[in-house]
Image: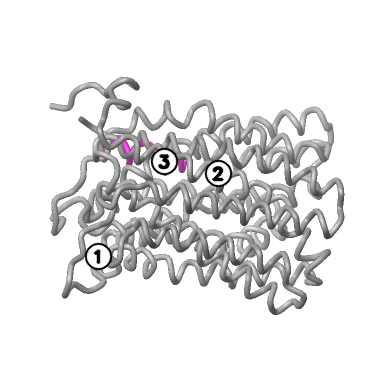
Amino acid sequence: MASASPSPAALTAVPRRRPATTLLRAQLVTAVGDGCFYVTFVVYLVQVGDLRPAQVGGLLTVAWGAGFLLTHPLGALGDRIGLRRVTILLSVATAAALLTLASAPKPWLVSSACVAYAIAQSGAGATRQALLVSLVPSTQLVTVRAGIQTAVNAGIGLGAAFGGLALLSGTPTVYRAALVGDAALFVVSAIMLTRLPPAARAPVRTGRGWDAPRDTRYVVVAALNAVLYLYMPMLSVLLPLYLTSRTAAPRWIVAAVFVVNTLGVLGWQRRTARRVITLAEATRAIRLAGLALCAACVLFWTATATTDPAVTTGLLLAAVAVQVAGELRLAAGSWCVGFALADPTRPGQWQGVYSSGVPLARAVGPAALTTLVMVWSGPGWLVLGLVFLATGLTTTLAVTWAAHRRPFQRLDPGAT
């Protein structure tokens, strides 16, 4: 019978808590750079990199597609030579890509740097997740991961403010300085990661192949998770385009969307994660996430039915609040499932497969969602909402199917 969740003081007393704190701080540092990067990146590519908007869209699809393909191999490499080592190397590679992007004189070098950045970031997402498995007791994985996500969102918000200042200047020199500053933060993060103990490495298994991609049940769950993570390009790409061109809301609503999202994650992500202890609770959270994301899509559609700016703004803010509720539950449920169904002795492989859904969503999401909603408008929102709803329901069945007859001892990522 599971006991109650430990208090914050008890968590701090865990001997292996300090390495997890180091990882949190390292990700907080890079998140500040990421926030600045997200705000200035596309503008930099168009105004300084001499790329047309259509070329930028194609480049991002190719770059994140490459990241998707290499996420698992990089995670497996972490199992082979050490997760800490690979994470540090990927942080340095990200810094190198950013410096190349800042100094590249030709479009093909800019494009190459973008692809390298996406690959390094995708791989690091997997190895950092795998590091958690080796650093944190299994009963605290979801709670600690929620704390990291909260810190990351805070860092992105701070970085976005710096990015906004760069946009106000509008000069190539300031844009390049922002990229150089981002690169410096990744170097600082790499140095911080050297403090992790050697014990953070996953045990090497010689003579074993890539089993994770052949784990059909786990791959199916990961694929469904990738569909739900389409909310990310919906928030970052689709909504800014849709809100400014298809609704009567004032333009500042785009900034308000990100403020509401950030505050929601900062305020409630850890609280939500504490309620997700078992796989049953994780699948329930994912079902509710699918329902909430569907409801948010319907509200976004409804916002186009009025020409009153005040009413439109109210509907949009309500939609974003519902979307955040879905995002919080999806994150907690997804983490629990991804940890619980994975082989804990080779976390790089399994987290590589599961984490590959993020670059996949980033690769196909912008083009797919803008085509669906910007062309079909209201019906497009309805289709997207039904996709979220159906995927959330299907994930419950897939997780139940995947949880049976696992070929290894599963982690228990929530209960103590």
Element under disc 1: loop
Relative placement, left or right, of 273 versus 34 is: left
Residues 39 and 190: in front is 190
Q: Helix, strand, or loop for circle 2?
A: helix
**Of the residues under marks 3 and 2, which one precedes in the sequence?**
3
Residue at x 50%, y 58% (from the top left corner): 91
Q: Earlier in the sequence, mark 3 or mark 1?
A: 3
Q: Taking 198 as reference, is 93 above or below it?
A: below
Mark sitting on residue 350: none
Q: What is the chief secondary structure element of the magenta stretch?
A: helix
Residue at the disc numbered 2 = 29
**Which of 415 and 74 lies nearest the eye of the viewer?**
74
- Label 3: few (<14), some or many (≥20) within 10 Å? some
Asked whether disc 3 touches disc 1, contact meaning CB atoms under 8 Å apart, the reply is no
Q: Amino acid at mark 3?
A: Thr
Residue 119 spot, x, y in % from top left: 51, 67
Asked whether the viewer can see residue 94, the reply is yes
Determine which of the numbered discs, if any, sits on residue 22 in the image.
3
Tell me: residue 297, above or below residue 362: above
Q: Is there a contact, CB below 8 Å, between mark 3 and mark 2?
A: no
Please tell me the numbered disc located at residue 215.
1
* Disc 3 secondary structure class: helix
- Residue 145 horizontal/vertical position (percent): 39, 40
Amino acid residing under circle 2: Val
Query: What is the CA distance from the residue labelled 1 to the residue labelled 2?
Result: 35 Å
Report the span colored magenta: 280-290
Q: Which numbered disc, 1 or 2, marks the residue closer to the eye? A: 2
Amino acid at dot 1: Asp
Number of marks: 3
- Picture quadrant where residue 82 is located: bottom left
Please tell me which residue is depicted at 35% across the width and 47% down the height of the picture. 196
